[in-house]
Amino acid sequence: MEETKKIKIASLLGIFGNLFLLVVKSGVGLLFKSQAMIADATNSAGDIFASVMAFVGNKISTEPADEDHNVGHGKAEYIFSLFIGLAMILASLIVIINSIKSIITNHAFNYSFLLVIICILTIIIKLSLYIYTKIIYKKNSSILLKSLYKDHRNDCLITCGTLVSILFSLINIYWIDSVAGILISFWIIFTGLKIINESYDVLMDQSIDNDSKLQIENIIYQHSKEIEMGKMSSIPIGYKYIIVLTIYVDGKMSTKDAHEITKILQTNIKNQVKRVDRVIIHVNPKE
């Protein structure tokens, strides 16, 4: 499947790109004792984990339905997104503790133009990954891709903050380095919480969005003004949903004609509503 292949490529690019940045940032950050750069390196470690989770989650979620999993494995990507969010928060808390210790002990670091180069290199790599992953997300709408592209975008902003703190060290203002490390970590925590919340909603069977509901209603009433729509339910199976709804038709209508209407509506809804995977329609006579 083409979409699955693209998610796989995006995940692998994230793994290798962040692995390279982790090695470089860690080495330079430890060498010159920059808390902001070390925080940035920790973020890259979290990004590697996120990309690995996206790769594995995508592989599992695209497995077809079987006897034990009748509606497929779509929710797997939300379980792995939950892991990504938790890992982000844990790594960030560690950096916050270390940064606070640095402020208390009046920690200073050694300025080097190499730190500036690493920041610029990071921004270029992460901006490229952000653009590429967001383009794929717009065509696929996977929460795993959404987590990745947001992470890449945040990294660009985070590294800009790291760069600013490094430049301030030229005038012997070092505390900004630790503050930047703390702010970076809070940004990561905020992103992690949003990912966890979105994953939780789907895992707790949150219903499909209102825009999609309205779109489904319009499709039904556009087909025939004589049809009355009853209760609509939705079951998330990953990003997409199973729609279960009831329609009421003329009681004198033959069973064959009623089923023909059902088939047409199922096809139209599935083809026109992006987040619908399958449609189950119950037909009842009007009272």
Image (spheres, rainbow, N blue to C red):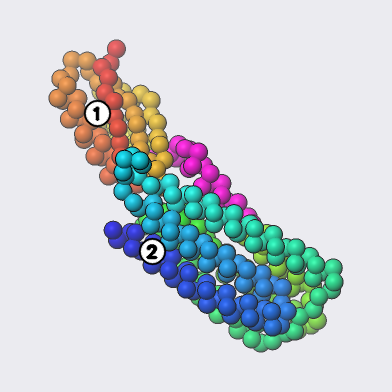
- Magenta span includes 140: no
Which element is circle 2 on?
Answer: helix
- The image quadrant that residue 40 belongs to is bottom right
Where is residue 248? Give x, y as percent.
Answer: 28, 21
Where is residue 79? Give x, y as percent.
Answer: 49, 49
Is residue 166 in view from this perspective?
Answer: no
Neighbour class for label 2 at 10 Å: few (<14), some, many (≥20)?
many
Dot in front, 2 or 1: 2
Q: Please identify the dominant SS of the magenta region.
A: helix
- Where does the magenta region start and end? 189-212
- Magenta span includes 197: yes
- The image quadrant that residue 113 belongs to is bottom right
Q: Quadrant of the N terminus?
A: bottom left
Which element is circle 1 on?
Answer: loop
Identify which residue, 214 or 16, lies in the foreground. Answer: 16
What residue is drawn where x is 17% and y is 19%? 253
Q: Quadrant of the C terminus?
A: top left
What residue is drawn where x is 31% and y is 44%? 66
202, above or below 249, in the image: below
Dot placed on the residue nearer the N-terminal end, 2 or 1: 2
Residue for badge 1: 224
- The kind of residue tagged 1 is Ser
Residue for badge 2: 8
